[in-house]
Image (tube, rainbow, N blue to C red):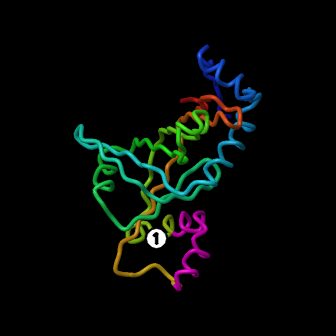
Amino acid sequence: MAKIRHIPVPPPLEYVFKQRGIKLKKFKTAAAFEKKFKKFVATQHVLHLSTCKENTPRSTPLEYRTDGMNFFILSEGGAKFDNLKHNKKVSFSIAAPYNSEEDFCGYKGVQAFGTAKVHSRKDLPKEFMAAFRKMKLGAAMKTMGMKALPAEFNYRIIEIILDRFKYGNPSEGIYWTYWQRKGE
């Protein structure tokens, strides 16, 4: 079972939240917090995946899908895969667009850390297809007029197993709350 920790709100922000009528939530269970988190990530489509090799970081915006608390990314290639051969630890962020001048408390975002597994269509076809099914891409492919992924690419799916993350969404009463997988 995962655990959560609420970050205390600094006094200047307490005043701002009070003036805007924002009541902060204190989640009693990790499951209740996960439900809110999943609701947020379902409204977004792009994360910025950061990988690293030999002290050189790389960040790539990528479309994602989720299954439970795991994130899945379909990709045909790129330097991120070379980085992942050397270092399976990744981080990513997701942020909803907002204008702080119009609504300072309107930000919504996630900063996450996890471990990546790569499922290659060529090298691990069974694992690849299992991950592909979890991504539920059939409807999107049908819309594009595709019955299957083009054979000329060795598509890979990056599965990210979350270790920990923090999520904030003050408009919904969520100041920064940390989630951590048990045992981490």
Few, some or many residues within 10 Å of mark 1 (<14, 14–19, 20+): few
Spot occupied by residue 87 in the image (x, y as percentages of width and height): 33, 43
143 magenta-colored: yes
127 magenta-colored: no
**Which residue is at a point 75% across and 27% down the rendered structure image?**
23
Q: Nearer the viewer, residue 149 or 143?
A: 143
**Which residue is at a point 61% across and 76% down the rendered structure image?**
139
Spot occupied by residue 3 in the image (x, y as percentages of width and height): 65, 29
Within the image, what quadrant is residue 82 found in?
bottom left
Relative height, residue 68 to residue 7 (above, below) = below
Spot occupied by residue 153 in the image (x, y as percentages of width and height): 35, 75
Relative height, residue 94 to residue 127 (above, below) = above
**Which residue is at a point 29% across and 46% down the rendered structure image?**
86
Viewport quadrant of the N terminus: top right
Decide if residue 32 is on the left or right side of residue 175.
Answer: right
Q: Which residues are magenta?
A: 129-145
Disc 1: which residue: 125
